[in-house]
């Protein structure tokens, strides 16, 4: 019976996450420190997503900052990535999307200033740091508002801007839908700006669509927030809750009322043979239940733990047998989080 229950648990978790390629709320990262080197983010141009060092005499690294940012139904975070002109851009790789069909990219932005001669500051790329699938840029429409532009492929392709304007200093959910087709100039980039996530794709109005120009797609596998082109054209603000999925529904950080956010915990089993389970927690949690199952469904650990909002070394019964194990954390409100660890 335990084997069946474990299989159902593992299968359910897999189905919940299968449509999502990656998510990042920046919640577990160190504040007032550069994003590069935290998680999978890098400014190293020799690594996927990296953009190299910034330009100009006043360069600083792009930082993680403490700032609440959210979108109803989609997610919330207490931390964000600072968009600051003339700083070091930062990027990361993700599992390649090679199929014909739709790829969704979501994020929450809060722009505080845009430039009248805009340069793209966000790129999704294909198989290389200089092969751009699509780009985003913003331009002012008044002293307090801006519009959002999208462009396929290389810099010679035209940009399409949203007809609507958006207020400075306001959180907006942006959902990009990139439809990859079989030809050389038939891909489409669609933007849903100020999206109502809970209404679904069908319940939102398209803010901008761009199908003009040659494609640079195929092996879509990285993204970059590009800020290292000097101050001209670059906006200021913050961004957080970045998500990539193969469906609209797969973008959300709010899985359900009885699931912790996917990024709430990061669990490492590197020291379990010594009786230590390392848990990096984005929240403080009291009186949680920690359970560990082996692949046959046998419960080998069951204890009450408390976690600080930081890195926690939790004492467990040493695990000496190599194999796959399932770690489950259950909160006081019956919220659950599960993660697989591999012991070698």
Image (tube, rainbow, N blue to C red):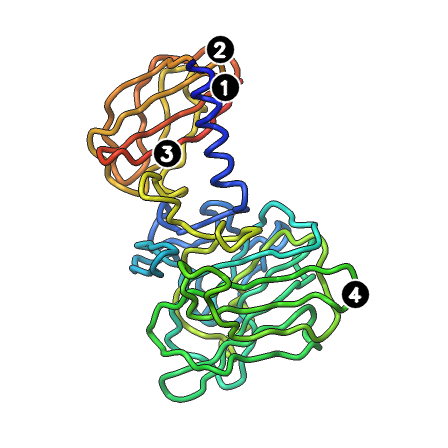
- Please tell me which residue is depicted at 50% across the width and 68% down the height of the picture: 192
Q: Earlier in the sequence, mark 2 or mark 4?
A: 4
Residue 337 badge: 3
190 horizontally vs 17: left or right: right
Where residue 292 appears, as percent x and y from the top left, is: 38, 20
For label 4, the residue is: 184
Q: Which residue is the extreme one toward the front? A: 202
| Element assignment for label 4 | loop
- Please tell me which residue is depicted at 54% across the width and 45% down the height of the picture: 19
What separation in Å lies between label 2 and label 4 (alpha carbons)? 52 Å
Do the CB atoms of the residues marked 4 and 1 lie less than 8 Å apart? Answer: no
Do the CB atoms of the residues marked 1 and 2 lie less than 8 Å apart? Answer: yes
What separation in Å lies between label 4 and label 3 (alpha carbons)? 43 Å
Q: Which residue is the extreme one toward the bottom? A: 142
| Element assignment for label 3 | strand
Q: Is residue 323 above or below residue 161?
A: above
| Element assignment for label 2 | loop
What separation in Å lies between label 3 and label 1 (alpha carbons)? 19 Å
Do the CB atoms of the residues marked 4 and 3 lie less than 8 Å apart? Answer: no
Where residue 341 appears, as percent x and y from the top left, is: 47, 25
What separation in Å lies between label 3 and label 2 (alpha carbons)? 23 Å
What separation in Å lies between label 4 and label 1 (alpha carbons)? 45 Å
For label 1, the residue is: 343
Q: Is residue 258 above or below residue 197?
A: above
Q: Earlier in the sequence, mark 1 or mark 2?
A: 2
How many neighbours does mark 3 have within 10 angstroms: few (below 14), some (14-19), or many (20 or more)? many
Q: Earlier in the sequence, mark 3 or mark 2?
A: 2
145 horizontally vs 51: left or right: left
Q: Nearer the viewer, residue 249 or 133?
A: 249
180 horizontally vs 65: left or right: right
Q: Nearer the viewer, mark 3 or mark 2?
A: 3
């Amino acid at each position: 019976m335990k084997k069946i229950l474990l299989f159902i648990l593992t299968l359910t978790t897999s189905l919940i996450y299968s449509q999502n390629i990656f998510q990042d709320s920046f919640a577990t990262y160190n504040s007032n420190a550069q994003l590069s080197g935290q998680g999978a983010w890098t400014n190293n141009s020799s690594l996927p997503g990296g953009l190299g060092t910034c330009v100009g005499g006043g360069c600083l690294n792009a930082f993680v900052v403490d700032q609440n940012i959210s979108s109803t139904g989609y997610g919330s975070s207490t931390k964000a990535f600072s968009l600051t002109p003339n700083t070091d851009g930062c990027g990361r790789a993700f599992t390649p999307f090679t199929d014909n069909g739709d790829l969704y990219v979501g994020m929450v932005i809060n722009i505080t200033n845009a430039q009248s001669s805009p340069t793209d500051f966000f790129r999704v790329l294909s198989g290389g740091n200089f092969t751009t699938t699509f780009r985003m840029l913003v331009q002012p429409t008044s002293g307090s508002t801006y519009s959002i532009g999208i462009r396929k492929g290389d810099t010679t392709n035209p940009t399409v801007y949203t007809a609507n304007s958006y207020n400075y200093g306001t959180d907006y959910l942006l959902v990009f839908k990139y439809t990859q087709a079989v030809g050389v100039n038939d891909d489409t980039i669609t933007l849903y700006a100020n999206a109502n996530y809970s209404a679904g794709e069908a319940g939102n109005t398209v803010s901008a669509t761009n199908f003009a120009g040659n494609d640079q797609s195929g092996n879509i596998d990285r993204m970059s927030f590009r800020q290292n082109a000097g101050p001209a054209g670059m906006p200021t603000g913050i961004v957080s809750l970045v998500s990539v999925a193969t469906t609209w529904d797969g973008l959300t950080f709010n899985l359900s009322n009885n699931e912790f956010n996917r990024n709430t915990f990061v669990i490492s089993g590197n020291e379990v043979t010594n009786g230590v389970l390392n848990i990096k927690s984005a929240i403080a949690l009291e009186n949680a239940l920690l359970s560990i199952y082996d692949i046959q469904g046998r419960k080998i650990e069951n204890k009450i733990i408390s976690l600080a909002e930081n890195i926690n070394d939790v004492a467990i019964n040493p695990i000496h047998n190599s194999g796959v194990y399932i770690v489950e954390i259950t909160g006081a409100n019956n919220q659950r989080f599960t993660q697989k660890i591999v012991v070698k």
